[in-house]
Amino acid sequence: MKEKPIGVFDSGMGGITILSKIMEYLPNENYIYFGDSLHNPYGEKSEEEIMDYAISASQFLIDKGCKAIVVACNTASSVATDQLRKIFPHTLFIATIPALKVAMDEDRNQNVLVMATKATLSSKKFQELYQSYQKEHDHIYLLNCSNLAHLIEEEVQTVIDQKLEQLLLYYQSKNIDVVVLGCTHYPLIKQNIQALLQNAKLIDGSDGIRRQLKKKLIEYNLLNPKTDTGELTVYNSLGEKNVQKTWEILHAYQKQENR
């Protein structure tokens, strides 16, 4: 009998940066990736819209038989995960949140820049985390990268570089030590970001997510006991053209990470 898959969804193709790390860490599992490119970016939408999209994506993956769902979108995780767990109580959900805690645990005296969407930065979950550190440390900068995820989705490199130059100009003189990539799309352009903030360390939440996923799969006796290499199926709300594009971006990202 075929092992039930793990579902991963995002507001487009950015979630493949999480998916890639999970597949590397748990190669025996089967996966279904759903990219909601039709509604990209979630970070520019209202909380009600984000909730509706997250519920719809989760239902799609549950209907496909997924035993667990990774919400590979910082915005959807921040806004919708608690409600998703109530609506689908028999499904294991793993949330994605900006890795601010990781940065602060390394060194609380670092200058930290968090790049994320407006919806993520203003969400209750992130604000509670941010405020817990900001009380004692005034060197955490929050940068609303409006529309950047959409530009990455469209792969318009010259426009992406222009946007980054505008966004990061102010911070080039702030001796930034760590950049928290608070959107799953941003690791796709981390080389562009690194070029502008050459001395900064770039981090995302993928390592913590994959470890948490494995821990919960074991806890709920859902980890695949077989040693066969798993399979990946890709869906996209904009259809087959975007499915093919997702595969191309996934392969390019894996090649980049393996250099």
Image (cartoon, rainbow, N blue to C red):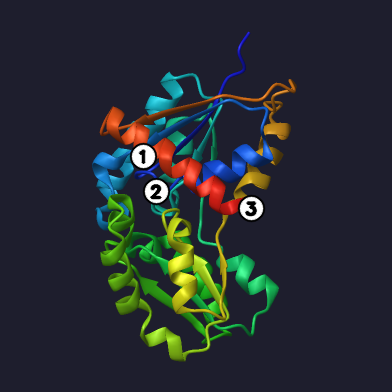
User: Mark 2 and mark 1 in contact (Cβ < 8 Å)?
Assistant: yes
Q: Place residue 118 in its image quadrant.
A: bottom left
| Front residue of this view, candidates 166 and 76 | 166
State the SS at label 1.
helix
The answer to whether residue 255 is above or below residue 33 is below
Q: Which residue is drawn at 30% across and 28% down?
A: 240
Q: Which of marks 2 and 3 is nearer the N terminus?
A: 2
Residue marked by disc 2: 76
Q: Is residue 224 visible?
A: yes
Say left or right for 161 vs 21.
left
x and y, in percent, of residue 246 in the image:
39, 38
Please identify, in this view, whether the residue under mark 1 or under mark 3 is nearer the observer: 3
Mark 1 closeness class: few <14, some 14–19, many ≥20 residues within 10 Å: many
x and y, in percent, of residue 96 in the image:
51, 51
Q: Is residue 95 visible?
A: no
The answer to whether residue 234 is above or below residue 138 is above
Q: Residue at x 42, y 84 (%)?
A: 171
Question: Which label number is shown at residue 207?
Answer: 3
Q: Earlier in the sequence, mark 1 or mark 2?
A: 1
State the SS at label 3.
helix
Mark 3 closeness class: few <14, some 14–19, many ≥20 residues within 10 Å: some
| Front residue of this view, candidates 22 and 90 | 22
State the SS at label 2.
helix
Residue marked by disc 1: 54
Question: Which label number is shown at residue 29?
Answer: none
Disc 1 to disc 3, how far (Cα)?
A: 23 Å
Say left or right for 192 vs 96.
left
Amino acid of disc 3:
Asp
